[in-house]
Image (cartoon, rainbow, N blue to C red):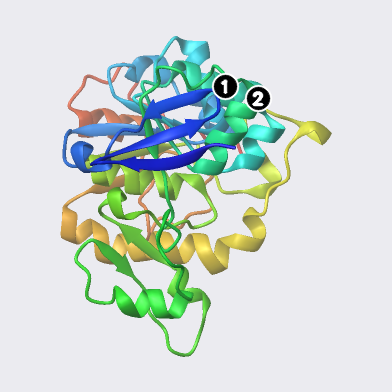
Amino acid sequence: MLRVEARGEQCWLVGHDLEICLQDFAHSRRSVTGPVLLLASGPSANEFPLPRYRSLPVVAMNGSIVRCVDEGIRPFYYLCDDPNFVIGRPALALMGVSHGEHLAMSLDVLQAIHAADATALNGKKIYLLERVNRQEGKAVMSDRAYAWSIRNDDELISNFSLLRRKPNRIGFSLNLKRGYFGSRTIPFGALQLVCHLGFRQVFVVGMDLRQGGGRFYEKGEAALPSSLDEDFEQYILPSFALMARKILPRTGMQVFNLSRVSRMPERVIPKITLQRLDELLGVQSDASTQTAPANAP
């Protein structure tokens, strides 16, 4: 089993055959600026002309790494917080580890990767993803008690409810050194990551959020199970709505959705065409009639 050890001001990922000094999120905060692409795994991601925007930094997550590898693009970050993905798709997870410039992963994901290939993590720049209220060495509070404890926090922004339990799980972290909020979909973790890093113009590709549509890299009975339909109304939509209401005005970060078939309402995250993407990036569009991918599931 892998474990995290604090040695002075550094944290190390340690196993019987592994010792890696983990990267410190404190050092990466506000370290970059400008636009970034977030590459999710909805079917519309397969239609996005990724090579055309290869000059932009890309954050890949889970199986979306396939598009990066196919197009010869090295993602700036590869993000994974679901050990079940690693267990179900070990080849894709190892592909992400191999090709990502930086890795942002939870401890259980790192453990699953190490179990799949004991040498895969050697020499990698790894940031430890930890959920808020679930950080190594700290006592876990109830969701309501934790939300109350951070109600006036400048870096951990959350909902708070005395009457209902689930709203207390909704939030957004401006500082990943202190953890991140899960929302049952990995693009939301990626949004917290790029906000922490300093990006202020974010273009999300492949965020269809439709369980029936599956993922662009798998089909039929071989597809891994998904709980998008169960989680959308209770966790996913409220998380994005909180970001739109409280985080974007405060930080100046702009978020745009390049999936026209996305379940995310346009009132929460605006949907844009490829022509509008080019306008926002200040580049010459070579096809003014182009639109964002619209392959309905």
Give the residue type that dot 2 points to. Answer: Ala
Q: Which residue is drawn at 42% across and 62% down?
A: 239
For this rendering, which residue is in front, 229 or 24?
A: 24
- Residue lying at the far bottom of the rendered structure: 163
Q: Quadrant of residue 295?
A: top right
Q: Categorize mark 2 by other alpha carbons within 10 Å: few (<14), some (14-19), many (20+).
A: some
Residue 208 in the image, given as x and y percentages of width and height: 54, 44
Q: Residue 216 carries which label?
A: none
- For the point 30% across and 33% down, which residue is it? 23
Please say whether residue 292 is visible from this viewpoint.
Answer: no
Residue at the outermost right position: 221
Q: In which quarter of the image is residue 266?
A: bottom left
Q: Quadrant of the N terminus?
A: top right
From the viewer's perspective, is 111 left or right of 281? right
For label 1, the residue is 94
SS for callout 1 = helix
Q: Which residue shows up at 65% across the image and 24% down it? A: 116
Q: Quadrant of the C terminus?
A: top right
Q: In this view, does 235 lie to the left or right of 213?
A: left
Query: On screen, 111 above or below 266?
Result: above
**For residue 65, side relative to residue 213 (left or right):** left
Q: Is 34 situated above or below 287? A: below
Residue type indicated by callout 1:
Leu
**Which sits earlier in the primary sequence, circle 2 or circle 1?**
1
Quadrant of the rendered structure where residue 228 is? bottom right
- Using residue 256 as the reference point, say whether residue 114 is left or right of it: right
Contact? badges 2 and 1 (CB < 8 Å) = yes
**To which residue does mark 2 refer?**
116
| Residue 204, x across and y down, in percent | 39, 39
Asked whether residue 181 is in view, the answer is: yes
